[in-house]
Amino acid sequence: MKNSNLQCTVLVLLLLALSCAAMDGCDPCGAQAGEEWVQAVEPRDWNFPRDHGAHPAYRTEWWYFTGNLSDASDRHVGYQLTFFRFGVRREIENGGNPWQVRDLYMAHFTVTQVEENNFSVAERISRTGPGLAGARTDRMEVWIYNWSAVMRNSLIVLEARDDALELKLTLKPDKPLVFHGDNGLSKKGAGTGQASYYTSFTSLETRGFLRVGANGPKREVKGTSWFDHEFGSNQLAQNQEGWDWFSLHLSDGRDLMLYFLRRTGGSIEPASSGTLVEADGTARHLPLEAVSLEVLDQWKSPASGGNYPSRWKIDVPACKLELVIAPLVRNQELITSESTGIIYWEGAVGGAGTSNGQQVTAEGYVELTGYAGSLGGVF
């Protein structure tokens, strides 16, 4: 269904809409959101399945799926399917006009073929229009054209089809929903409202199929996925240039999420933190001082010139956890010129170490932003 001319036309129209919003005083790309957007300030009174859906009173929101899967031949594939909602303005006139722009919807879809050392990317952008994109507010159902994430009862179904990539996966939670930070209020800095509401299903049993290449076969796959949902209005300060985010599954059943927000000049934002989820689903908040991260190697992108960390040592002494993690494919960089306009690295990783004194292996995903240009105000 993808058409490059249509994509370019839509992108131009959306950029014009952003420009008009800025002239009206909305300033959608400013680091400080206008007071019209609700801020993430206090712990939230959660209500599910409603809170798996969209929260249009907040400026930014994303539904993030990543996973490590294998096919019948035990070939390893990683995937990312992410849906972004970005509020252009809180209120619009003549709300019945489907072509007015209140929110932009963007999506990224990647597949990493480990044995083939191949990384494939597709992306989408749209406004709501007459059903082109959107998200329900009463439950998880978000879509852009024929890409979607839908949750019914306890199952999540992902579907995405592009000329060169296709997937259909069913995800079933193995553990309870995790609330990061203070009951889901995840601080990103010291400023008022500089936070997001952040929940995850850290372990999802996954089955379905993937296709890579216009004439490629549909490969049945299974494995484990991770789902993040975040929304807020004022997450990054002007002195913060990006973040390093880790989501890891350990072979002993533990799951680990870490994020390190980088300030201009290289220091780490003290609000950075993480969560350790035990095999039984019990979650433990990890403040920055509880975690040590050492970069062991780097990789320079031949496309963007960005210089990314590419191997890490993670130490969480209080949890008796030490890991060394590295990319399964070095080049997993996204240059999203047809959607968010952001250049970032996000890809499948693996490693090994010790957990509670026992040898473990690990697999997961890492996201690295701000190493090849700014985030463009989107976050």
Image (spheres, helix red, strand yellow):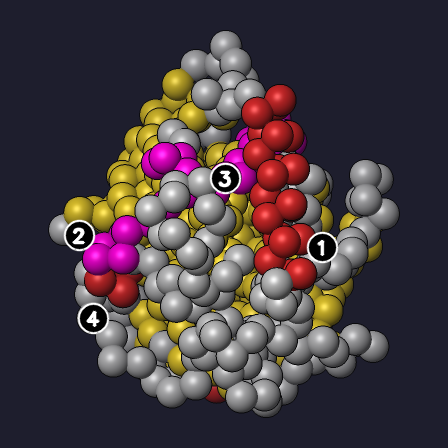
Dot 3 amino acid type:
Ser
User: Residue at coordinates 27% horizontally, 65% vertically from top-left?
Assistant: 51
| Nearer mark to the viewer, of 1 and 2 | 2
Pointer 2: residues within 10 angstroms few (<14), some, or many (20+)? few
Label of residue 47 in the image: 4
Q: What element carries label 2?
A: loop
Choose mark 2 or mark 3, whichever is in front. 3
Q: Distance between the residues labelled 1 and 3?
A: 33 Å
Q: Are marks 1 and 3 in contact (CB under 8 Å)?
A: no
Q: Give the range drawn in magenta.
A: 112-140
**On the picture, is 213 further left or further right than 48?**
right
Of the numbered discs in the image, which one, if any, rests on residue 126? 3
Mark 4 vs mark 2, CA separation in Å:
15 Å
> 56 or 356, which is in the foreground?
56
Q: Which residue lies furthest to the left in this view?
A: 153
**Residue at 46% from the left image edge and 46% from the top image edge:** 100
Q: In which quarter of the image is the C terminus?
A: bottom right
Spot occupied by residue 112 in the image (x, y as percentages of width and height):
56, 36
Quick check: 154 above or below 254?
Answer: above
Q: Does the magenta stretch include residue 139?
A: yes
